[in-house]
Amino acid sequence: MGNQALDVNSVFEQADLGITIRGSDWIFTVCSIMGACCLAVIGHSFTRPAHQRLFHQLIMVALFVGCVSNFAVASNLGQVPIQVEFVRGGKVVAAGTREIFYARYIDWFITTPLLLSALLLTASVSWSTLLAVILVDEAMVVCYLLGALTQTTYKWGFWTFGVAAFLYIAYSVLIVGRRGANNIGGTVRTTYNISGIVLITTLLLYPIAFGCSEGGNVIHPDSEAIFYGILDLLAKVVFPFLLLWGHRNISFESLGLNTTEAGRPVIREKGDYHASGIDGVGNGVDTQPTTANGANGATAAV
């Protein structure tokens, strides 16, 4: 019977310019790839001890959310018609309103922090740096969403705020994170540099895709679907593959991730404390407790 998603879901308010069956078929393909990769990551996670599956779990959730959001987009759901700022000719002729898929932005709001967390944890950045990147990333996605839903030229103000947020993320990945990975060295450095370049380059292309589609109304929604679909596959399939492949030879201890099996607390030997004065190395800082007179481990006589 073929793909009938657009016909079945045509009962909702439709834009003058939207995806066609070809665009829907492509997005369903992206959805299927992400679903299959999600199952593959779940299966591969069982090759690691239960307390060392953090990176698999972050990527698994990102793939699952991406699969769901692409299913919504392919089904022509999770969208709202918005009056375009620029009416073009050719394939985007007569575009009074254009489909804006807010489902995509919900996806990015959830998944990009997960992907960035997986990358930056590989470099053992400080928790404060990680938290800042996550919050700025979410602000970036919100800015892009507000821009997409704005009908006037003010959408480019939100786009500019989003790009500014991206620049902070790029700095954190390319400078702070890279410094931490280089300090650790070995496989960590190689894995971080390769996968980091893939992720940050992909994130750079998203605002360009926005400018060509929701923002500037330059390309048809089918072309938009292809553009975003390729970027999503790079971010959620290619990048995770490179990262997990590198993590085969990376121990959690080398990253400062002191995880242990459920029900078994981390036991430190006496004097087993470390501190780091370099932003980019060490998830948290442990300091050896001292008494009032400054003697380590000493107790006052009663």
Image (spheres, rainbow, N blue to C red):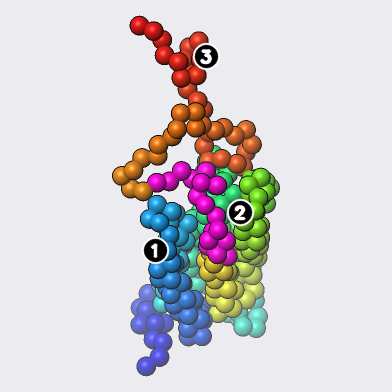
User: Considering only order in the chain, which callout, 3 or 2, is on the residue closer to the N terminus?
Assistant: 2
Residue displayed at 57% across by 77% down: 226
Q: Is residue 215 magenta?
A: no
Please tell me which residue lies in front, 48 or 212. 48
> In front: 295, or 256?
295
Q: Is residue 240 above or below residue 297?
A: below
**SS at circle 3:** loop
* Residue at the limit of the structure toward the front, as seen here: 269
> Of the residues shown, which amino acid type is indicated by label 1?
Phe
First in sequence, mark 2 or 1: give its number. 1
Q: Which residues are magenta?
A: 242-260
Q: How many marks?
A: 3
Indicate whether residue 259 is drawn in magenta. yes
Q: Which x, y percent locates residue 257? A: 49, 45
- Above/below status of 213 relative to 118: below
Residue 11 at x, y percent in the picture: 35, 78
- Residue at 35 percent across and 82 percent down: it is 8
Viewer-closest of 160 and 24: 24
Badge 1 marks a residue whose secondary structure is: loop
Question: Local crowd at mark 1 within 10 Å, few (<14), some, or many (≥20)?
Answer: few
Q: Amino acid at mark 3?
A: Gly
Residue 239 point in image, percent of width and height: 57, 65
Residue linked to disc 2: 188
| Residue at x-position 40% and y-position 39% | 266
The kind of residue on which mark 2 rests is: Val
Q: Is residue 241 above or below residue 269?
A: below
Query: CA–CA distance between discs 3 and 1?
Result: 47 Å
Spatial CA span between label 2 and label 3? 37 Å
Res 46 label = 1
Disc 3: which residue: 294
Q: Nearer the viewer, residue 220 or 273?
A: 273
Q: Is residue 179 left or right of residue 109?
A: right
